[in-house]
Amino acid sequence: MRSLNCLAVLTLCSLLAGVPAHAQSTMPKPLSVAETIQQWLKRGAPEEAMKVVDKQLKIYPNDPNLKFQRAVILEQLNQPEQAQELYVTLTQDHPELSEPQNNLGVLLAKKNLLSEARERFELALRANPNNRMAQENLADVWLRMADAQYRKLKAAEPGNVRLQRKVESLQAPIQALKDLP
């Protein structure tokens, strides 16, 4: 009953103001914080997105989503070390979140810290077994680790044709990984 009274008051106020009640529903809604951040990022303005995130973090300093957004923006601003620190903090404070684990794994893989990256992707998948990006990233790291191991073995046994074939068979997939953005 109370919400009906509120609706009646809102309709009456809009009529008195000269705005038809149905016009209120067709007016564009203001963007959410997440939408605003995404729009700035799509426009190639991570600095502006960071301003929005930092403003919101002053209001909600413990919000993991805002912290995650901040880390993503730090990566876009070419500040991977700061992003990594924030991802580490997020993974410690919120181990149930898959995305920070995955993104931390990506940063570690870029540094060729493959074992550590593998661990992070596995943690991401424990938190969310359906995280397709973490699954793909884990497969990519396994591929790179297999290549590295076969190369070590080949160096120890240069005449081993079987190892040579394995190293060669991995070159196309390894190159495909390098060609990705």
Image: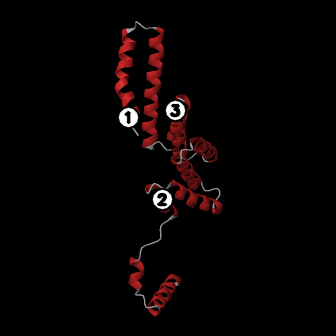
| Left or right, 57 with reference to 147 | right
Q: Can you identify the residue that label 3 sits on?
A: 118
* Residue at (45, 54) in percent of width and height: 44
Q: How is the image coloured?
A: secondary structure
- Give the quarter of the figure containing the C terminus: top left
- Image height of 138 relative to 86, above or below: above
Q: Residues within 10 Å of mark 2 (few under 14, many from 20)?
A: some
Q: x%, y% of residue 138?
A: 46, 34
- Image height of 114 relative to 45, above or below: above
Q: Nearer the viewer, mark 3 or mark 1?
A: 1
* Residue at (56, 51) in percent of width and height: 68
102 and 125: which is toward the camera: 102
Return the residue found at the far bottom.
Answer: 16
Q: x%, y% of residue 171?
A: 37, 24
98 and 160: which is toward the camera: 160
Q: CA distance from mark 3 to mark 1?
A: 21 Å
